[in-house]
Amino acid sequence: MIVRSLELKEYRNYEQVNLQFDDGINILYGENAQGKTNILEAIYLGGTTKSHRGSKDREIIRFGKDEAHVRLNIEKNKISHRIDMHLKKNKAKGVAIDTIPIKRQGELFGMLNLVFFSPEDLNIIKNGPGERRRFLDLELCQLDKIYMHHLTNYNKALAQRNYLLKQIGVNRNLLDTLYIWDAKLIEHGSIIIDTRKSFINRINSLIYPIHKKLTGGREELFIKYEPNVNREEFEEKLIKGHERDLYLKMTGIGPHRDDMLFLFDNTDIRRFGSQGQQRTAALSLKLAELELVKDVIKENPVLLLDDVLSELDRNRQNYLLDSIGDIQTIITCTGLEEFISHRFRYDRIFHVANRKVTCEN
């Protein structure tokens, strides 16, 4: 899988950019706050319809403008495709694949498989469960359209049920209709629970040897899935929780409250790990994700690395750079010294400055 080119118009700090990428290692270097990360964000947006930062479309459009455009030319299974995305301030984005508009944005998932690694990925370890659920959902939606279908319908049913809980406070006669949305949550939520469990089991088989090697055999990393409710008890607990849900006017049971723990030697890294241990766990997670995607799609994904080398010590830098192999990689950094000192191969270099990106070779 290859990103051949990227074209941007009125995107973030760029009026217009047109970049041609090499199949191998592409480096974007320049001072901070020049827009390097914006390039990676645009590629990720083009593959998933979502900003890795969680930004809204109106925040991505260049200041003072009403629209922005993203165009990606990619190669998947040796077949060329074009992805066009039209961002609007006050309307839903428009997406087209090979010039044909798609009706649902979810149709784009799987066209371009990406693994994005940035210093912010430490938040997967450090922050609340919402960050970890977001990681699960973004990765699974890229790999599994059935999961995406059930997640979309679960979220719709959850929103309707929460709305109904508020309405019942005004009109108690609506209480019987709560069971309709219970059934929808159970139907879609049960699949979500099973799929997340299976995904974490697969990640565990990959992350264990990676983390052990990264730590010189000193630590063993394990991810523990913590579902809010087991599939077998979902219906019973959801119904038992009716009165509490009516009091709080929100749904308290279901996979929208799932979490997962990162454990080394049965110790919760989030609570008791050092920042170095948390950083190494995040790196191990991303490398395991990379291997899992390769195994599922039977093709290399595109790897996006946003200024991560400066966050790692020499041993972890070497491990990461050695893991890239023949994967197309687009890396941002402030300078080229890290690569020169490693005698690391790179195929195309771009300098980012003053809202412009210049290819230097």
Image (spheres, grey):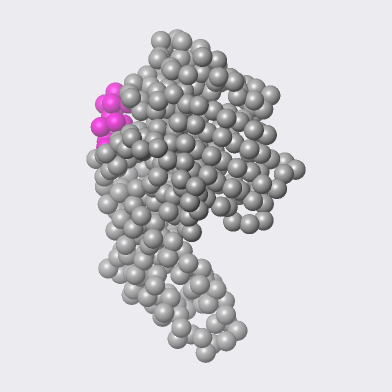
Q: Is residue 310 visible?
A: no
Closer to the camera in the image, 47 or 54: 47
Q: Position of residue 259 (x, y in %)?
A: 40, 53
Q: Is the residue 168 above or below the residue 190 in the image?
A: below
Residue 136: x %, y % from top left: 39, 49
Magenta region:
206-221
Q: Residue at x 44, y 49 (%)?
A: 108
**Percent x, y of residue 171:** 57, 87
Residue sitting farthest toward the front: 99
Q: Quadrant of residue 254?
A: bottom left
Does the magenta segment cover residue 213?
A: yes
Is 217 magenta? The answer is yes
Residue that extends furthest to the bottom in the rendered view of this protein: 173
Q: Name the residue located 36 percent from the left edge and 65 percent from the top edge.
A: 189
Of the 4 image quadrants, the one containing the N terminus is top left
Q: Nearer the viewer, residue 130 or 108?
A: 108
The residue that appears at 33% across and 75% down in the rendered structure is 236
Q: Is residue 331 above or below residue 360?
A: below
- Residue 323 location, quadrant: top left
**Residue 90 location, quadrant:** bottom right
